[in-house]
Amino acid sequence: MEEPPHLFLCPISMELMDDPVTVSTGVTYDRRSIEQWIFGYGRATCPATMQPLANLDLTPNHTLKRVIGSWLDRGSPSTSASSSPSTSSLSSPAHELATPLARMLEAERLRSALADLEETPFKVTALKNMGARMAGDVAMQCEFVSSSGIQVVAGVMAQALAESAAGGDFSAFAACEEAAAVLALLPLADATSVGFVLAPECMRPVMALLQRGSAEARLHAMDIVTKISNAGAGDWTAGIEVDDVLKSLLELLSDEVSTKLSSRALDVLLDVVERSRNGPAKAVEVGAVHVLVELLADADDRHDAERILLLLKRLCKCPEGRLAFAENDLSVAAVAKTMLRVSQLATQLAVKVLWLVSVVAPSEKVLEDMVLTGAVAKLLGLLHVETPPATKQKTVRMVRINGGFWRQYACFPTDLRDYLRLLD
């Protein structure tokens, strides 16, 4: 079927109007779109002209509706409710269109949408349609990248972020969030695509969304970061304010908004600590040890516990991390709780953490807590079960080095005292 005349398309959705209505400025919109604009978003302006609306009356445009109906009646017999022009627009999934010609037309629509994106006042709608076009369609994603889509969308994000920072309305930041949703659809597995995303005009808005976006926008931002990291194209943390990112990730973990958000935040936090220069020290400075210990104490998921222990191990490799661990009253108990209980990997990581805080840089408080929380008893229990040689070796050395200190406590079990004498 031929493309509908531009007059038949709603200026907001850019789809064929089903119930055209006219506002006080004389512009006609589809009823559903303009009602969402006025009553859903609380706007009192004409979307096309941005002029104030004298009233909120929506006058049915019967003439235009009859003309659109006549145009539809002249369409091919294959035209139906399920294949109307509105569903063959940019918002319909391209991979559902079978013919090569149809795919060529959809690719051309995508290129046209990219060309108009910077100028259209309806960026959110345009980006939503673009995302719907690309979702699950590798060919359209490749077309997007080859048509400089990443650069165009990154420019829109940078502009939207600047407008939002300057006191613009909510639609500016909403456009930034929708743009990130489009980028999150891409595999970002090749060096060229990753290079475009790593450009400052793209990474700054992505980091802004990670810090203050909606829950969905934060997920998209972390998806982008994770894909870049997995591509191995370089240090994505270079040129960003790592402290702010760390704080945002820790806030997400503390708030526990959703399991999915928390899990993704743990992955990104691991990557930041690993990649960023002085990452562990910076993470400790913004309170990472306290947050992680609290999470570990309540962790029910094996994978979460293992990642938290891995993070604690990395943080305790620096003096600041060991000091923060020692000062936290729950730290030893939370780590000891995972030993011989969660998984073999968790036990190995827990032993490494305790090794760092009791042998590399021991403190009386940590050694005392290890007795009171049963960590020492679990360490001795490890000597009677099958464990990796490195883990067993660390366990034996911990007991030998600190046995004299632990033996002095009245609460220390007699049988364990005898066992320590045998080790000596």
Image (cartoon, rainbow, N blue to C red):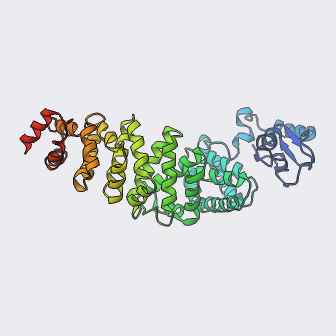
Where in the figure is residue 367, as x and y percent of width and height?
Answer: 24, 46
Is 375 left, or right, of 306 in this rendering?
Answer: left
Figure quadrant of residue 151 = bottom right
Where in the figure is residue 75, as x and y percent of width and height?
Answer: 79, 39
Is 41 left, or right, of 208 in this rendering?
Answer: right
Where in the figure is residue 326, as x and y percent of width and height?
Answer: 33, 50
Up-down relation of residue 228 to residue 292 (above or below): below
Figure quadrant of residue 114 = bottom right
Identify the image quadrant of the N terminus. Answer: top right
Name the foreground residue: 91 vs 256: 256
**Looking at the image, can residue 188 be seen?**
no
**Looking at the image, can residue 83 be seen?**
yes
Up-down relation of residue 117 to residue 259 (above or below): below
Name the foreground residue: 148 vs 267: 267
**Residue lying at 18% horizontally and 43% vertically, measured from the top left:** 406
Name the foreground residue: 189 vs 35: 35
Q: How many marks?
A: 0
Identify the image quadrant of the C terminus. Answer: top left
